[in-house]
Amino acid sequence: MKCLIIDDDPLACDLVESYLQQIGGVDYCLKINDGATAFHLLATETFDVVFLDLHLPGIDGISLLKSLPSNCAVIIISADSNFGAQSYDFNVIDYLLKPIDFSRLAKAVGRLKSRLHEGAQLSSNEEDALFLKDSNTIHRIDLSKLQYIEAQGNYAAFIFSDAKPVMTLLTLQKLTSLLPSNFLRIHRSYIINLRKIRHIEGSRLHLQSIHLPIGKSYRQILQDRIQVINS
């Protein structure tokens, strides 16, 4: 596992690195103390996980979080709890408050490893289907019948028009990068199949069998993706 620790406090970086060494499974660990250096590094190098402090000199942690690629998992390490709820709009595995406790970090890393190695995996062997592996079962996801995906706690539920839901541990952020272009995130809790839209009314989007809210920060993205002809 390749890790990047971004914190302006060198002692905090050393502590996290020490904990990671005790937990095991880390092949490479790099420590950065400012946001600008981290930003340029992340533009050229990929990591399995970033341990990110929110308050950094130069480019702050929230701006970094927004710029990270969707396939990069994040564990936030911060003394500030105010961003907790918003952080899960991004690919955040866990939100750890300082001072960092070893057992709490170990639990977060365990969740990360589960998602990387034992969690559900998608394989796009057909243009109209994805194969989702959950434990010992591989589910074929028929994209033509998939209406939307809903975040439900630590899980994401694939909702179909004519079949039972299928659950996965993959995050919506990760799924966004894996699904074809006709799937779009419209809310912190929903990804929808654009081909299933019946109509849009105000901040509500109506699919074949349900209506879903459109998040304020996703409205412009949705408008940019659909062609609207005024009559």
Image (cartoon, rainbow, N blue to C red):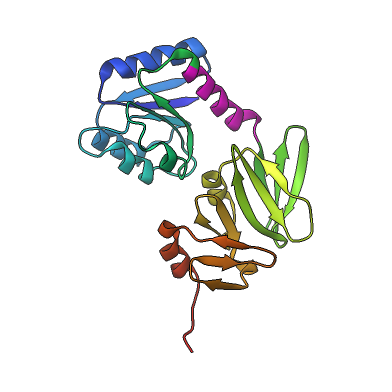
Q: Main secondary structure of the magenta part?
A: helix
Give how far across and how far down residue 10 sits, in percent: 26, 18
* Residue at 41%, 57% in the rendered image: 217
Does the magenta portion include 112? Answer: yes
* Residue at 69%, 54% in the rendered image: 159
Question: Against 25, is 138 above or below?
Answer: below
Give how far across and how far down residue 97 sits, in percent: 39, 24
Give the mark count: 0
Residue interval drawn in magenta: 104-119
Q: Residue furthest left?
A: 58
Residue 125, visible in the rendered structure: no
Whether residue 34 sits left or right of residue 75 in the image: it is: left
Whether residue 42 sits left or right of residue 135 in the image: it is: left
Question: Against 176, is 20 above or below?
Answer: above
Whether residue 217 sits left or right of residue 165 in the image: it is: left
Q: Residue furthest top?
A: 22
Using the image as rendered, state which of residue 85 and residue 95 is in the foreground. 85
* Residue at 63%, 68% in the rendered image: 195
Residue 42, visible in the rendered structure: yes
Give how far across and how far down residue 208 sits, in percent: 68, 68
Q: Residue 55: which quarter of the image? A: top left
Does the magenta portion include 194? Answer: no
Q: Residue furthest bottom?
A: 231
Whether residue 186 sits left or right of residue 35 in the image: it is: right
Give how far across and how far down residue 13 sits, in percent: 33, 19
Q: Residue 145: which quarter of the image? A: bottom right
Using the image as rendered, state which of residue 20 and residue 27 is in the foreground. 20
Question: Against 223, is 26 above or below?
Answer: above
Q: Residue 120: which quarter of the image? A: top right
